[in-house]
Amino acid sequence: MHETERHRVILAAVQSRPVATVAELCDVTGSSEATIRRDIAALHVQGRLRRVRGGAEAITPPAQGGLIGRPFSVNETINMAQKRAIARVAADMCKDGEPIIINGGTTTYQMVHHLVGKRLTVFTNSFAIAEFLIHNSRNSVVIPGGTIYREQNVILSPFGGVVAGHFYAKRMFIGCQGVGPYGLMEADPMVVQSELALIGQAEELILLADSSKFSGRSSLILCGLDRIAAVITDAGIRDEDRQMLETAGVRLFVAETNAQTDRQAGVA
């Protein structure tokens, strides 16, 4: 992650809680402790945050707290070719008439472009996904009640919600902060609580994760690998990660980017 992107993530993080610790900032940026401490020092000198022992805090905390994790606007610039390819494979799994859940995220958001011509019932906690499908498709769109978190473009509620508790889905498409032997990982307790309420409503849980997510780690485990039916990723996945999924009995789909497809077809 470039310095400018790291600074955006750090500033978003310090707006989300009383103090963002160095360890938390290392998790969300994938950077070393030394790098984060340098970034905090630089932003402190610029007057954009306040350096405190063990981390940083906002100069002017907002009235509404935020979520731990990178903002949607930052994530959507990372590994976009892979995310588009992964989303295309995911959308191909959806058949007209099916009820599905699409969880908020920049990879799952890319599915919307391939759902325009379909007739589905889509439950989503993503404000961006709901808005796109409402204006550009004839899919039925269902959203939960709750608070809109602008940085991540999601709608979350600590109370679950009546609609979420009664919505049945053929499949749930979900992203994550990281994935490893212990399962799917997320950074924010509110996100975990919201996603747990939805996971039980779907027959199949489909993980959309570019290959970098297999190196990502976070502090909270959402669910074990045994709950995941399939993973859609890109060609960068390591052999040990393939083996991990195979051992867990998880189906693996490797999406090819347009550039890879063009080369195989002999397109310059």
Image (tube, grey):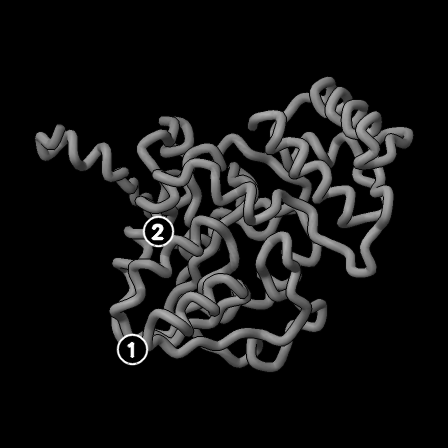
**Quadrant of the image occupied by residue 135:** bottom left
Point out the image quarter for the C terminus.
top left
* Residue 200, horizontal then vertical, whole percent: 52, 67
Residue closer to the observer: 73 or 265? 73
Q: Which residue is mark 2?
A: 87
Picture disc at residue 241: none
**For the residues carrying marks 2 and 1, which lies nearer the camera in this image?**
2
Q: Secondary structure at mark 1?
A: loop
**Quadrant of the image occupied by residue 1:** top right
CB atoms at circles 2 and 1 under 8 Å apart?
no
Outermost residue toward the left? 266
The amino acid marked with disc number 2 is Ala
| Image point (41%, 27%), residue name | 240
Residue closer to the observer: 48 or 233? 48
Q: Horizontally, is 130 left or right of 262 in the view?
A: right
Estimate the spatial distance between the alpha carbons at disc 2 and disc 1, rounded to whole Å. Answer: 19 Å
Q: Secondary structure at mark 2?
A: helix
| Image point (23%, 33%), residue name | 259
Q: Which residue is mark 1?
A: 97
Sequence-wise, the earlier of marks 2 and 1 is 2
Q: Horizontally, is 196 left or right of 235 in the view?
A: right
- Residue density around tag 1, few if under 14, some if 14–19, many if 20 or more, within 10 Å: few
* Residue 185, horizontal then vertical, whole percent: 59, 45
Residue closer to the observer: 199 or 209? 209
* Residue 95, horizontal then vertical, whole percent: 26, 69
Q: Horizontally, is 147 left or right of 254 in the view?
A: right
The amino acid marked with disc number 1 is Gly
